[in-house]
Structure formats: C-alpha cells, structure tokens
Amino acid sequence: MIKLKKFTKVGIVGYGVYVPQFRILVNTIAKTWDKDGESISLALGVKQKAVANMDEDCLTMAVGASWQALQMAKINPQKIGACFVGSESFPYAVKPTSTVLAEALGIGNDYFSADLQFACKAGTAGVQIVASMIEAGLIDYGLAVGSDKSQSKPNDALEFTAASAAGALILGSNKKDWLASLDYTSSLSSDTPDFWRRSTQEYPSHAGRFTGKPAYFKHVVGGTKLFLAKINKSPKDFDYVVFHSPNKKFPVKAAKMLGFTTEQLKYSLLVENIGNPYSASSLVSLANVLDNSSKNAKILVTSYGSGAGSDSFSFTRLSGQAKQKLTANLKDVQELDYGQYLRFMGVVR
Amino acid sequence: MKVAVLGAYQTKFGELWDKSLADLIFEAGNEAIKDSGVDKKDIQSGFLGNKLGPQTTGQNHLGALMAEVLDIKVPVVRVEAACASGGVAMAQAVQSIKSGQYELVLVVGAEKMTDVGGEQIAEALMGAASESERQAGLTFPGLYALIACEYFAKFGASQKDLARVAIKNHYHASLNPKAQFPFCITEKQAQTSSDVAWPLRLLDCSGVTDGAAAVVLASERVAGKFKKNKVFISASCQASDTLSLDKRPDITTLCSTKTAAKFAFSQAGIERKDVDFVEAHDCFTIAEIIALEDLGFYKKGQGYLAYKNNELRLGGKLAVNLSGGLKACGHPVGATGVKQIVEVYNQLSGRAGVRQSKGAKVALTHNVGGTGGTVVVHILNK
Amino acid sequence: MNSPIKIWRDNKTKYQNLGKAGKIVVATKINTPVDGFSAFAPYWVAIITLDGGQKVTAQLVDTGKFLPKKGDKVIGVCRRIKAPDKVGVIEYGIKFKII
C-alpha cells in the first residue's frame, strides 16, 4: 500500500522535449493497406505521427530532450546524482542507455542509474524514483527521461499511432530554482496482459479491445480516482490535466469519466500531431502544459503503461509562463511517404 | 650526385581479375629489370609503394613478398603514404642512392583493388583521411568535392571547367594501350554522368584499378656502364601538410604541393618555363587544376582557364598527363607515383609512340597522398 | 564489428560539440557512400566553423529537400554515427542540424 506523503523537497528545475522533424500522415499509412484513412484518422483523433530518422534512436532523442532540460535548469551536469531512462525501444537488451546518456551530458560517474521498462509509463516511473531520492536527501538533482522510437507491426492498428519522441525532467531540491513543485505521487499497478513484446520479437502484440476498459481506463481512471481520494482533491482543484494519450479518444473519454473538462485537457493533446511516443507521451504533454501554464496553476498527470499500471502526480506551477515554448517548433516538419517511413524505421535497408 | 633511370615498365591498368598483387609485382619488377639490361643479381635493394595490401589481400610484410616474388634476396621495404606511396617509394630509393648506400635499386608500385566491393574500397581508401572525416561519412570524392565547391565559390569555375580536364585526359589515354580507359569522351558524356559527390560526377573521378609499374634506378657511376639513353632525376622532393582538410586555412591550396615544388625547382636549378610536360595527380578533375596552380604554372584561381585552349594537350605548350593521368590511365593507388616516372622515362627516351611529346627534354611528376597530407615532386631530364 | 574499447576511449571527446552552434563553410552531398553509411545515402557532409572559431568536419542531418549552403547556421546533435550492425556496440557521436 502506498502512503500519502507530501513532497517538500522536490520541484522541476528543467524540462525538455525532443520530437523528430519527420511526420507520416495516418492517411498515407491507410492508403498503403487500402484502408479508409479519413475515418481512421477521425476515429483516433490523430492526423499524423512523428518518425525518427535512421540515425536516431531512444538514446539520441533522450540526449536531445535532456540537453534542453539542462539548458533550462542552468546547472553543472556533474551536480546530477541520478539518471533514469524509461523506454520500450532501448537500443540494447542488455547494456544501460542511461549511462550513455549520462556520458553524453557530462554527468560524471557519481550517480544512480538504471534503465526502466514498464511500457508507456517507464519514463514517469523514473520521475517517481528520482523524486524519492531527492526527498530522502540522497541527491540534489536527478534526471528522468521517457524516450521511444516505437516499433509497430506493418498493417496493425497500432501502426497509425506508434511514434518517436523523448521527454526529460530534471528535478531538484532547491526551492528557489523550482519552475514547479512536485506535491504528491502515487501509482496503481496490476498484472494485466493488454500489450506486450517478447524479447526475441521485433513487434509488440496486443489484445485488441481488451486494451480499453480493463486496461487503460481501469488504471487511468481508477488510478486517478484513488490518487484524488488520497490527496483529498477533486478535478475542479486542477487547472490542467495530462493523461497518457495512445490516441485522442482515450484521454478525452477518461477526462469525461472523471469529471475533467476539455479546457483542462487542452494542452495535453499533442497526440493529434505527433502520435503516441509511448514512454515520452506523458512527459511531452506535461512539458507543453508547463510551457503554457501560469504561476500557481495546479497540474495533474496520470500516465499509463500496459501490463499494467498508472503513475499519478500533482504539480504546482511556481514561475510564470515560459517565454520560449519548447513545443513551438513542432510545426517545422517534413512529410514522409510510406517507403521513406519504412526506411527511417529500419524495416527496409 | 645524379640518379639515373635505366629501365621502366608499366602493366596494363584496369580490372585485372586474373592477376593477384603478387602477379602484378612479378610482371612489373621483372619486365623493368629486363628493360634496363641489368643483371637481376646486381640489384642491391628494393622499394615497394603500396597502400591497400593488407586491406584488399590480407597481406602485410610486403617487402618480403616482393623479395620472394622477384627472387631478390636483398633489403626490400614497403612504403605507404596513401596515394603517394609510389612517389615516396621513388623518393626513398633516390635518397638511398644519393646517400651512397646503394648504386642499383628496383622501385615497384603495385596495387590490387578489385578483389573487394565498392563500398569496402571506399572505406579502405578513407584510411588516407582523418578520423573525423571518416566519422562524418566522407568519401574521397566527397573530400575533393568540398575543395571543388570552395574553388567554384572563390574563382567562378563550374562543372563545365572540370569536364574539360577529363576530356583532355581521355584523349591522351586513347593513345595509350596500357590505359584503363583508352577512349575519348564527349562533353555531353561528361556533363550527364551520374553525381558522385556534388559537384563531382562519375567522369570527374578516377576509377578503381589494378596495376603495377617499376623502374630501375642507378647511381651515375653504374649508369655510365650502360650505353643506352638515360634519363636523370634532377630533383626529388617530398612535403607534408595536415591530414585533415578542416585544419587548413585555405582548402583550395595544397601547401605541400607548393613546398615540394619550390624545393624541387631549386634542386634542379630550373624554372617553370623549362618544363615540357607534367604528369600531375588528377585523382579528381579539380585536383589537376589546383595542382597546376600550386606547382606554380598558373596563378591561384586561374588554372581552370588554361583548359579552354589546347596548351595542356599533346603538342601544346605544357602537356599535362600524356599517359591519360589517373582519371583515364587508371589509379592503382600505390602504383601511380611510379607509373608517372615510367611515362616520363618513355617520353624522354622517345618511346612513347603516337603520344610522343616531340623534343621534350624536361618533365615534372606530381604525386599526392590523400588530400595533400603528403606530396612528392620529381623533376627528370634527358 | 567495431572496437568497444575505442568507443569507450572516445567517450572523453566525442560529445564535446553537443549543442554547439556554428556556420557551414562548405558542404557536399555524398551519393556513393562508404561501408556503414549506405543506409543514410545520399547525405550531406560539411566543414563547419563553430562559434568559438574551431573547425569541424561532420555529417549534416535531417536536410530533407533543403539544400545546405555556405553560411547556414547549424547546431550539434547526438546521433548514431553509422547504421549499426545487429551485434556490435553502437557508436554515437555529434552530427549537425541546420537551424
């Protein structure tokens, strides 16, 4: 059982986002398989997804997002005492990506580190671990990243949304550096086999409609309800909410089921234009909310990872709106055709 | 003390599928010795110019290979300086005679390139560039393309000017039965050949070639015993520059060419106008243009204009690459520097047949390693 | 297979240009690549002057239909150097992206 604990020593000192420059339209993918792209796009609420280039992977994107976060935090990287990377598309089955990231950023050798796997919530699991370490007084700063170059089987439903991106958070213990405070966190976990990938398989498998009610909704809605009850808050106490977005339909429905408004969701639906970058999804949406929220805004985040579980967080924005929005250049894109998409994803060489 | 060339030989250059590196050394070495009229057992030392042996054939210890193949159990050393391996082998051999150590030596340049695929050869050749150039995914055409881009921007040259170099060299090669590409090309063919690395097209780049060349060098005293026509080496100068292009202040100038040429002309005691023809290092068309400028024959940025008339062709004021150059005769990397000496020897001895430079007395050879990390210049005269 | 030891040793220097800004001095498009880079071909390579004055030679990334030219501003980003094989240690380094 998770105890209620108000964090007093943890805040966000820097955040970063990396979304590759390339997009493929849902329509383009649908056309390849003789499907109706318009209706699929409408049903999912997704227009296109982000695709990483051939020489990009989970690590390179993690570096991109983390470097941004580091620039924002304005700290000496050697002060970072923990580096956790969450992904379901690590470049290695065995060999930590988090230490390669730490090396690239110049973090030194004196830090806690591990790679985390919990489908789409691996990144936020890292945030919980880093926050706990700071609260315990073990470290002053910690980096948590969610990064994925998500693989999806050609002609499978997930092909329309499985995307590439990375989101990074640097948490710190010095109140005067905080852009937002972390107030509470909790999780809901279970053994629910809705989506999985065996180690020798290239593509994940999923259980179709089972991924809905008993999986995503049970943990996102159930987890958020449990969290709100613990911290004695209700949806109206928050200005913004972020739910993991495998598509647009699910977070909108979850919000409705819980009593959140579309206004509260408005900055966390990047899925429409970048697709679902798995472990990065919640962190990228959180970054967009942080960019656009004002001082004292209350932010609720509930991520979701198949298999299954959800992590919930409550943040309070402490500084004003960001002058330079990280997600501003998401408009600067290049469109791919299906063949180029396969090439970028390494399916054809 | 003068060093004489007593004999010379070049194998056919091309895709010689049925010849190994050992076969090429065997042919060139033995034929050069035969041509010179010396007794094989009088040869005192050997020098082998070769760049890619270990990568394309798995063979190191190439000096010993040459000694075995040619049956000359004398000190033989392999010299490697990228595409200047042959030229540096020559320079080392000349030094060994000038120093008084030896009086009769054999120099062979040999390369076997076609046993491995195109991308592997490109990677092996990039051994002549720097680590960061390799990490950047550069190729040799890419490196010279960067030079060409900068040259175009500074001096107003264009792809059309590059094509003129290839057209000239192919014309010369059409008169050379040993050339890899013994045929003329048209302006249209040059302009429409495929892009390799902009602005260099296929016909701006030397190809992948197998081949070998060899010369017998002698001290003046030993040479005096032979009644035949001799050709003398009046200058042999080597210079270095940075390995990386990005460490140079101006990538359109090969300082190593300028330095080697300065010392060579001083050593030979002659001026630019005394030179009748040149074998220059045209690994890419832009390289020949820049070579003529850095050797001092034309002002920087004006070399490309000389191709608009016939002054650089056979019969012209300063014929360049009568052999067909690297572009059209072929460029078996380690052999080129020695082949250039073979061509000069044949020309100055009056044995060049239909591509004979009439009345020629003085010639210059120019051999470059990589993008100019090493350059060797020789001046020879009748 | 590449050398894991060399990759480890180069850790000290290979990321030093991450996030560094500069300008293109000269660039070319490579159509015939070397082994290891075929998956990326065709690609652009440039000599770049960094804002601190130092010159570097590196691959340009995400150029798409854009034509890099002298004076274009670039920034160092982390990428895989080559298309990796299925077995060896992956080599990362800094390439440059036009901004």
Image: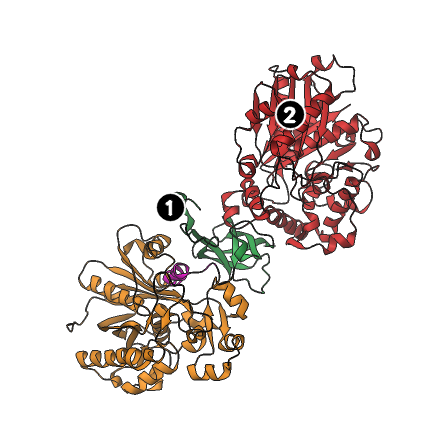
Chain colours: A orange, B red, C green
Characterize the local packing of mark 1: few (<14), some (14-19) or many (20 or more) Cα atoms within 10 angstroms: few
Q: Residue at x 45, y 55 (%)?
A: C80
Residue A260 position, x and y percent, is: 30, 85
Does residue C4 sit above or below A81 in this rendering? Answer: above
Residue A336 visible in the snapshot: no
Magenta stretch, main secondary structure class:
helix
Q: Residue at x 26, y 86 (%)?
A: A236
Residue A69 position, x and y percent, is: 35, 63
**Helix, strand or loop at mark 1:** helix
In the rendered image, residues at marks 2 and 1 fall on the same chain: no
Determine whether label 2 and label 1 are within 8 Å by CB. Answer: no
Q: Amino acid at mark 2?
A: Val
Residue at the far front: name it: B18
Residue C59 position, x and y percent, is: 52, 54
Q: Nearer the viewer, residue A183 or B336?
A: B336
Q: Residue at x 74, y 38 (%)?
A: B179
Residue A223 visible in the snapshot: yes
Chain letter of mark 1 equals: C
Q: Amino acid at mark 1?
A: Trp
Magenta span includes A87:
no
Query: Which residues fall within the magenta stretch?
Result: A55-68
Q: Which residue is mark 2?
A: B107
Q: Residue at x 54, y 38 (%)?
A: B55
**Labelled disc at residue A106:** none
Q: Gap in Å between the C-alphas at discs 2 and 1?
A: 42 Å
Q: Which residue is mark 1?
A: C8
Does residue B296 sit above or below B97 in this rendering? Answer: below
